[in-house]
Amino acid sequence: MTTEPKTNPPLGRIIVITSGKGGVGKTTSSAAISAALAKKGFRTVVIDFDVGLRNLDMTMGCERRVVFDFINVIQGDAKLKQALIKDKRVDTLSILPTSQTRDKDALTKEGVEKVLTELKADFDYIICDSPAGIEHGAQMAMYFADEAVVVTNPEVSSVRDSDRVLGLLSSQTRRAETEGAEPIKAQVLITRYDQERVEKGEMMTVEDVLEILAVPLLGVVPESKAILKASNVGTPVTLDGPSAAAEAYQDAVSRLTGETVEMRIPGERRPGLLQRLFGRAS
Amino acid sequence: MSKGYARNRQDSVTAASAAFQVRGRFLTALVLRIDTDSAGDAFYAQLDEQLRTTPQFFSGAPMVLDLAHAPGLCDADPLAALLAHLRNRDLRVFGVQNADRLDGAVLERLGLIAVTTGRDAPLPRPTAAAPAAEVPPPLRNKVVHAPVRSGQRVMAEHGDLTVIGSVASGAELVAAGNIHVYGTLRGRAMAGCHGDESAHIFCQNLSAELVAIAGLYQTSETLDAAALNRCTHIYLKDEKLCMEVIA
């Protein structure tokens, strides 16, 4: 797929994808969002901050092409250009994988800043895929961010952890520590949403989640088989065949780039009479 | 501080034979300001009365005489007489202040020193035999105009705490006075944290994990079901937390 790269100068926006809780879809969302941004023509790089648990490169399908990694660059063992992997599907997309053998202490504030500054000169969007938790790795991923996408499942513990992360974003980041700086623009992305279960009262509604988190909604991604499939074949869901999840991510990315897109809550269409009579075939 | 300490230690090792050591010493002395020009019977009667009511206040405390208001005593003889009377009452007078007219030889003879350094503490009150009551710090209220997130703790150490926004589960509000939440209270709220039983908690929507006033608490399991998810006023009455739905 070839895209028309946007003209200079690069935007250099740093967006952290974070959540606090694990398994809510940070890496999947990082892959989907960065691929969708790149498809729109933005020069995009996605960085894996989950040192020691290398997942992003597998989700992106480039695990066999990793030679140097983020930590090598931070420690000066490799040049940034050597570590960046250009995606074979979208030429505006690059991946900066992380090390499988080191731990998160290898991430130093100075090192991360140096790499990010270098990337800002070449890319429109720098997507930081945060590890789970609120420890050093997650803090390094969020520290230099301009924007944050907080990934949340409509489920109480995930929402509470996201709330904790929102607190950290507004206190433990460079923008929070710099006097007079605009605070990080944080938005919530609800994933694994299942309208049927919400109706049965087994899952929190979008309104409930937003009421607790009190930040703008970036999008609602439905629970979808397409995501697991895409992840297993190493393709970001937004580059895979059409699916409700891919649409939801594309809408979210459009909002991220400042477009106004009507919010669609997946599965809101009431089933027709025939479907109701014969049950849900899918 | 620690640096100096380390150096002293070293010195004591290298110069083990030092015969003395010079160190600073701060001490608190009582100042007896004499407001009458001649120390007569009335003066000693008042002094004895004071000593009788608060004996422990004076016992063993070093004392300085302040003669600023008693120029008549700034002479060798009346001062010697006064000193004898005071020492008779077991008062440990060791110095004088504001007595510039007295010369060094007189003081030396009387065993006194001229105190020129230090500064006066506020005048002790006769009732101050027990440690003086703490002056309450000035009231300082706090207003937070943002949601309080899980894991955050907001303190209003000396006053009321007002939150304009919701308080997430896992967040904590602590105030010496009242707590107001213009939003949903899902976390913990502790009013009257220094023991003020007249503190109140107000919230627009009560679904707290814990509410407490002056240490008396209730958790979400024991909260009044009638007040749950309602606009509620929580107060203490007869050592019991009461919840009143106000809207």
Image (cartoon, rainbow, N blue to C red):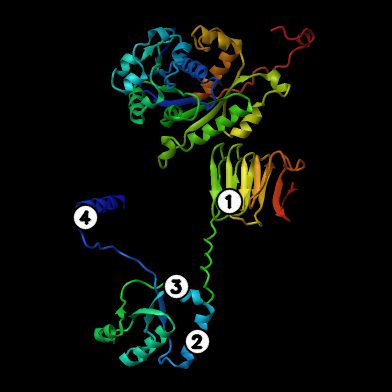
Gap between marks 2 and 1 measured at Cα: 47 Å
On the question of residue A40 being in view, the answer is no
Q: Are marks 2 and 3 on the same chain?
A: yes
Q: Which residue is mark 1?
A: B175
Q: Earlier in the sequence, mark 4 or mark 1?
A: 4
Q: What is the crowding at mark 2: few (fewer than 14 residues within 10 Å), some, or many (at least 20)?
A: few
| Rendered location of residue B49, percent (x, y) | 52, 84
- Which label's residue is closer to the chain start, 3 or 1? 3
Q: Nearer the viewer, mark 4 or mark 1?
A: 4
Residue B206 image position (x, y, % from top left): 69, 42
Amino acid type at mark 2: Gln
For image coordinates 73% across by 16% down, the residue present is A270
Do the dots labelled 2 and 4 sit on one chain?
A: yes
Label 2 sits on residue: B46
Percent position (x, y) of residue B220? 69, 39
Q: CA distance from mark 4 to mark 3?
A: 44 Å
Marks 2 and 1, the one that precedes in the sequence? 2
Q: Nearer the viewer, mark 2 or mark 4?
A: 4
Front residue (pair B56, A161): B56
Mark 1 surroundings: few (<14), some (14-19) or many (≥20) residues within 10 A: many
Give the labeled residue for mark 3. Answer: B122
At label 4, counting other C-alpha atoms closer than 10 Å, the crowd grade (few under 14, some 14-19, many 20 or more) is: few
Q: Callout 2: helix, strand or loop?
A: helix
Q: Amino acid at mark 1?
A: Ala
Could you give the CA–CA distance between mark 2 and mark 4, rounded to whole angstroms? 54 Å
Q: Circle 4 is placed at which residue position?
A: B16
Chain letter of mark 2 equals B
Which badge, 2 or 3, is on the more N-terminal residue?
2
Say whether marks 2 and 4 touch (CB < 8 Å). no
Up-down relation of residue A186 to residue A61 (above or below): below
Query: Between disc 2 and disc 4, whose residue precedes?
Result: 4
Q: Do the CB atoms of the residues marked 4 and 1 lie less than 8 Å apart?
A: no
